[in-house]
Amino acid sequence: MSIPERMIRQGSIDDINAQQYLKISNYEDTVRQLDICYAIVKRQLLRFQSPITGLFPVLSTEFEIGSVRDSIYCAAAVWGLYQAYRRIDDDRGKSHELGQSTVKCMRGILECWIKQAPRVEAFKTRQSAAHALHVKFHLTTGEPVLTDDQYHHLQIDVVSLYLLFLVQMITSGLQIIYTQDEVAFVQNLVYYVERAYRTPDYGMWERGSKYNDGKPEIHASSIGMAKAALEAINGCNLFGDKGASWSVVYVDIDAHNRNRSIFETMLPRESSSKGVDAALLPTISFPAFATHEEHLVQLTKTNIVRRLQGKYGFKRFSRDGYKCVLEDPDRRYYHEGELKNFDGLESEWPLFYVMMIIDGVFRTLPDQVEEFQKLLKARIFMDEHGDPVIPWYYYIPKESVENERNEPNSTWKVPSTGLFLWGQSLFVLAQLLTGGLLHVNELDPIRRYLPSYNRPRRAGRYSAFQAKPTFGIATDLVVQVVLIAESMRLQAMMGTYGIQTQTPHEVEPVQICSSTQLVHVYRELGVCKKLKLTGRPIRPIGSLGTSKIYRVCGMTVLCYPLIFEVSEFYLYRDMALLIDDIKTELQFVGKYWRLSGRPTVCLLVREEHMRDPHFKQMLDLFAMLKKGYCDGVKVRLGRLQNLISSSCMEHLDFMSQGDFPSEMFTQFKQLEHEYIGYQSLTDVPRTLTYREETVSLEAYKHKSTPDVVEALRTTDNIFAQCQLWGILLDREGPMYEVNGTNALAALKSLYHSAGGLRHWRAVRYCSSLLSHTVDSISPFITTVLVNGKQLTVGVIGQKETVFDKPMTPGEIQSVMYSTIQPYDIIGAVLQQEIVLYCGRLIGTNPDIFRGILKIRVGWVLEAIRYYLQLFPGEARAACVESLSPYRLRTLLQRVLTVSDWADERGLTPLQRRQLEGCLCRVPKHFYIQVWDILLRTPKGIIIQGQCIPAEPTLVNMSRSELSFALVVESALVGVGGAARRQLCVELLCVLATILRRNPELRLQHSLDLDALLDDAHATYRKDCGSDAEPGLSTATAALAAGHLARAVVNAVLRGAAADLVPADRPACLVA
């Protein structure tokens, strides 16, 4: 009973007594409610915890197999109650018991995984299912129970979830990690999840693609979990407050950024086969809170609720056959086309109601909490102890299947049997939160639910995430820039232009080093000889990593970015490309920096730069930086000593353990000169761009070796020498000698001399013969893939290879040289360049790829060649192979943005169709329109003799699915000419419009696009009174649409080509 407040005078003795009384009654009420929760947790969760391993099963009826994911959620519920009990002074030992039960479970999982340390080590170098950590273990022995062939263990989200809760629990004061070996192992788990963004896995539902055919996919839920785990564990001391410098975990900031950008690019999709999936709920909400971009959270959540919510719970995803009565329990995989059977019969999971309640508490949405509490209440039943039970799922019984198909959502669903521990765990947490027994800050001590700029600042020596509250636009972040000149004479010359630089000697004691040396330092991180674990795998340090200043072994180190590394691939020789890369680098760092402290970018100026014809443009860039801006990014150019205090400093304290040889840090070498006399650019000897006659020596492939050698001895033409040495290399092998020089050495020598002369055709030819691969091409391919595109490489008319999943650099090299080089030697490196530029462009300007589903690199090069024919004056080179890398990148951007400048430059309709057709670009919603046409064309669509059948296409696939769009796209690419291909696209759009306006029309025979196009061509020629080719391709879009519509209507009226049969209306609506 409480005393009414109005009876008590403010400030009286009675007032104080009443407050005291309320406190006591509230306290007693809290204890009583906590004790009820404690009893439920004991009966429903801890009763099933293995006394030996500490693991939990999925169901109460399971006595052998423990599941890691379910165990983590059970541990989280027990820990949540532990946190609630800590408010109470006398908890009669319950708090300690709950805390230790949590530790027991988390350590049990750790011990199971530590036994599999060799898998973690193998997974670091090759992310394959064969090396995945197991996520199911024997409840008693902790041994693996299901082999890799029996079950898909590759589930990145499980390891990420473990790391996330590990940090939360350690932050709350629990001691889970005991030894240095365990610290090293957890650091290796970080390496395990760092590449989630390019690792197709089997996801939260353990089956991979929606088709349940055993294929893994890139899952947004796995990447989001990994991103959240990396953010949480960065700089975390695994020993808690008692930790030492060597018990801290480090995260690669660039790996985090790749996961973040790819996760946010994929939302609201889950994967290429699953447009919407409830697995994203725990990713965007508790426990991961993987993004704080409010519009993305709302878009994803609304998508899930709108498309998956049912009366009994949420479907996991559409056409989910799991636990449906029609699913064959004895068969692991589905047959092709089987998914259609489960349409509308999916099981519904009340678990997601609970997730929505927890989400509502964290986001302070009382209406959402109330709505889903009501829905959940209707689905709860009581067990023999009177405890509430959340069913695992509700399914449609066999006898109701037909009724449900005829009348969706009309039948009763039946609950599954057994206690589902994951559901019960989240229910306990929801009850604690909604009952006011647990505050969100106690369930989330590291404040994942807040954007990083609102989280309490973590004190200490290690970098922390402190993001700016923006999305995709420049903030008030300042990028600090240090200019380092290679020599004093270069510094003096720059000074005459008013650009202040420092030499390596002037910045001492700070060391200016290559990022490759930092890679060697990080190799010491996470080493454990007992477990045979090496440190960080040899992965390059990206742009964000090189923008920190490092303290290591008493030294201060600043690394210059990868773009300044002298690599074996020829791109670094192009000064104009380097200038563009510097701008891109500064923009990238400005846009994606998420750490506290400012980024510091080190720009190197080498002596070879000032001899380059483009050095003037580099000086212009530095002058722009001096003004404080670079393409919208705020920059501050200054002396390193003045910038250090505001920089982001990373202390690599783990190195102080070992005896690390300081010689490993070799300072960027300063060149010493007697003469410091260059006062201006006019004094500097210039490197001239070399010109020579282009000679093709194809004929020599059929001549004898002595003839080839003789020709080699008599020619001075560099490109001719490259070709002749190439013939000898292919015929006689790399060690074949002429005049004491073997083929390999001769080609390397030609490669360097041609590079110095900027003879790009010869450079590319030699580079291909030497089998060079672009540095870090793999992440760029992944960037293209996660933007919903695919890549193909190959020569037009020959076999193409599709990149539809991330690949290792070795696999990429093998594909490039086996698919392209036999037909086009220079193409093997030229296509790599295009792949690299596409990856870069799609990261910064995704809009220019809109409408292109597959970036076919051979066809993209064809578009560039066609552009050069149209505007020969724009490039000094006569052919694509002779273009400088920068010019090639510029022309690529031009052909991709053809719609922006076509009218201004006066392109004819034919020229525009040629360019767009090469790219196979289609209008918005085009593939959905083709689906709608197919629905009304039972006999299918024929494009250039290739049929897209209505059955089983409409059965196996869904309307907005990527795989359907790919089928249509590959049929369109089969069309011979680029302009005709574009006309096919226009024809399908016209036909879709006609069918949409005439819902009664059905196409009784197959739709032959070639016949319709030929008909349209004929009517156009007749109207124009000309038989000249290429006919309709020269017509404007509106005129062409009119003729295409006439062809369709003629076919309807004649009942011919497509045999279109209208039902009862006399006319066909076109306009």
Image (cartoon, rainbow, N blue to C red):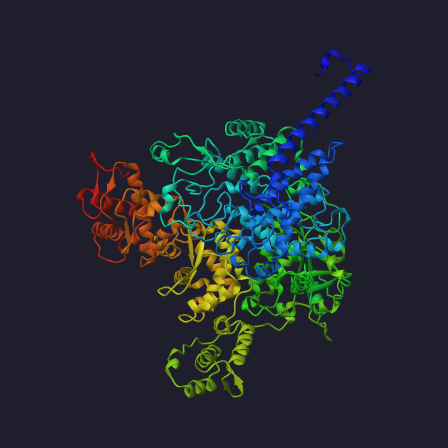
Image quarter (top left, top right, bottom left or bottom right) of the C terminus: top left
Relative horizontal placement of residue 255, taking residue 598 as reference (left or right)? left
Is residue 1049 visible in this depiction of the protein?
Answer: yes
Above or below residue 812? Residue 473 is: above
Instruction: Indicate the position of residue 17 as horizontal and vertical percent values.
Output: 79, 18
Let me know if residue 260 appears in the view: no
Q: Position of residue 154 (x, y in %)?
A: 53, 53
Quadrant including the N terminus: top right
Q: Residue at x 72, y 39 (%)?
A: 96
Q: How many marks?
A: 0
Q: Locate residue 562 relative to residue 25 in the image: left or right.
A: left
Above or below — where is 741 with respect to 54?
below
Residue placed furthest toward the right: 13
Residue 660, by quadrant, is: bottom right
Residue 784 position (above or below residue 809): above
Q: Position of residue 254 (x, y in %)?
A: 61, 54
Q: Nearer the viewer, residue 1045 or 843?
A: 843
Question: Camera-side residue: 476 or 319?
Answer: 319
Measuring 46% from the left and 59% from the top, which residue is drawn there? Answer: 891
Name, please, the residue furthest toward the top. 7
Residue 274, horizontal then vertical, whole percent: 45, 45
Query: For this view, does 701 lie left or right of residue 504?
Result: left
Depth check: 669 or 314 in front?
314
